Amino acid sequence: MKELQRKQGIRRIIYSIPSLIILSIIAFILTKGALGVMNKEWTSSERSKDLEEKAAVLVLREQELREGIARLETEEGIKDEIREKFSVTEVGELVAVIVDDQGVSNLAGDSMLPWYKRLWIAIMGSK
């Protein structure tokens, strides 16, 4: 009989409203902590993926730069780079300059138009 009363006393304490509230608060705090850890794991995996992609891009860029350096170490590469940067030619080479006639005619024709038509063309992009 005393054993039964003791068990009922323990049940009364466990199932009382204050103890249920305390247990609910503890469960809420533990759940919130677990969700925080899961969120941090998700964020770190996303950052890891981004860093892996950046590393791959940097490896490709490094390879391109090494190829460019190798090209510049040759005599032909140096000449090509000088021609490209400074628009120069070697002795005996000829350069052809191509002028677009359409661009020249548009400039001359547009200056003869009244100001409001030039404004309309500037806004709309065509005649």
Image (cartoon, rainbow, N blue to C red):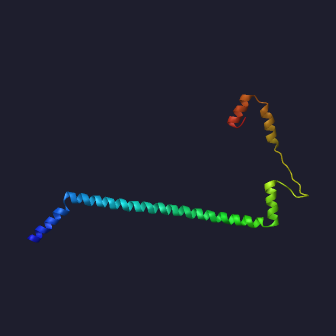
- Residue 11, given in percent of the width and then of the height, sits at 17, 64
Location of residue 68 (image quadrant): bottom right
Left or right for 54, reference 7: right
Pick whichever, 45 or 106, lies toward us: 45
Residue 24 screen position, x and y as percent: 27, 59
Answer left or right for 104 relative to 25. Answer: right
Q: What quarter of the picture does the C terminus occupy?
A: top right
Residue appearing at x 89%, y 57% in the figure: 93
* Image quadrant assignment for residue 63: bottom right
Residue 26, how many percent across, how many down? 29, 60
Residue lying at 86% horizontally and 56% vertically, measured from the top left: 89
Quadrant for the N terminus, please: bottom left
Q: Which of 125 and 16 is in front in this view?
A: 16
Residue 119 occupies quadrant: top right
Tell me the residue at 77%/34% (across/down): 110
In the image as oriented, which residue stretches furthest toward the right? 92
Please say if 127 is above or below 25: above
Residue beneath the point at 59% across and 62% down: 54
Describe residue 6's horizontal placement relative to residue 65 as left or right. Answer: left
In the image, taking residue 125 as reference, residue 95 lies left or right, namely right
Image location (x, y in percent) of residue 43: 47, 60
